[in-house]
Image (cartoon, rainbow, N blue to C red):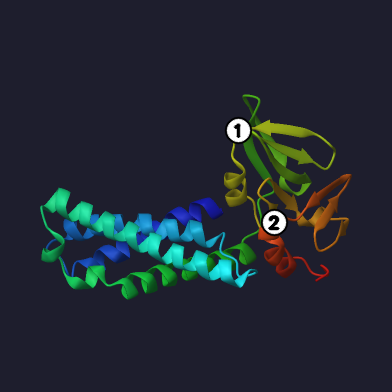
Amino acid sequence: MKKYFSLAYWFGVMLLMSFVFTSVVDGYSKALLLAIMFLPGALLAKYLMQDLSFENKRKGILHSICLAVSTLLTEYLCIIFTSFYLFKLFPENLPDLIFNPVLIWLLLAAFIALERVIEHYLIKTVPPDEYITFISDRKKVSVKVVSILLVESRDSEVLIQMTDQTVYRTKMKISQWESVLDDRFIRVHRSYIINKNHITHQTSNEITLGDRTIEISRKYRESFRKLIPGNPA
């Protein structure tokens, strides 16, 4: 659900931006291509914002500056490349509005925030999937989502541990699992996604699920405290 929503949402953003660009360039084809080149920076910002944390204020500010600069440079490079390669236009021949950094950052922030709001609403109103299907040891496997205890990334493979102790091996990356699993699951470590409904004990640094005790890495502690009621400070 989340995967297809994200694709549809950014496709809609691309179409909306193409209509915006028709007011600053000649022809819809040029506007559409510029809108397509707007997406890499937006998706980069979305990806980097997932790791943004102000638990350490100094690092949080530094990461925010790096995010803003890298996103802006990506947008500029994409726009300049598209304009020159396809239309033989140099930056000085393009409208200044396209290169306005404040406008670019505001648009990116608005689109990413809107996606999160809509996605949150959809998660609340749409019933979660009962089953999930994936490839394990070259076979298609379908399991009940509620029975997944945790997802563990281990070297070049990912292990899916079930509540009955069954373990499935898959090449599907943990970042992909994070995008397809619903809000019953939470990332607590670079190597672990856990089913929060199966937590039997928790401290500020660790959680226990069945016979597994897993460390909550510093990067994810703040989000964990917000999402799991009763977690000690």
Residue at horizontal 81 percent and vertical 63 percent from the top: 204
Q: Which amino acid type is shown beneath numbered disc 1?
A: Lys
| Figure quadrant of residue 22 | bottom left
Residue at horizontal 66 percent and vertical 25 percent from the top: 137
Provide the residue designation for mark 2: 186
- Residue that sits furthest to the front in the current view: 58
Mark 1 crowd level (few <14, some 14–19, many ≥20, 10 Å Cα): some
Q: Which amino acid type is shown beneath numbered disc 2?
A: Ile
| Figure quadrant of residue 144 | top right
Residue at horizontal 22 percent and vertical 52 percent from the top: 81
Above or below residue 107? Residue 31 is above
- Residue that sits furthest to the top in the current view: 138
User: Reading the chain from its start, which is encountered first: label 2 or label 1?
Assistant: 1
Which residue is more in the foreground, 28 or 54?
54
Label 2 sits on a secondary structure element that is strand
The answer to whether residue 80 is seen in the rendering is yes
Q: Quadrant of the C terminus?
A: bottom right
Task: Say which mark, if any, is on residue 2.
Answer: none
The answer to whether residue 117 is seen in the rendering is no
Disc 2 to disc 1, C-alpha distance: 20 Å
Where's residue 206, x and y in %? 82, 56
Decide if residue 171 is on the left or right side of residue 22. right
Decide if residue 118 is on the left or right side of residue 210. left
Which residue is more in the foreground, 200 or 221?
221
Residue at horizontal 22 percent and vertical 66 percent from the top: 21
Task: Say which mark, if any, is on residue 171.
Answer: 1
Mark 2 crowd level (few <14, some 14–19, many ≥20, 10 Å Cα): many
| Figure quadrant of residue 36 | bottom left
Where's residue 164, x and y in %? 85, 38
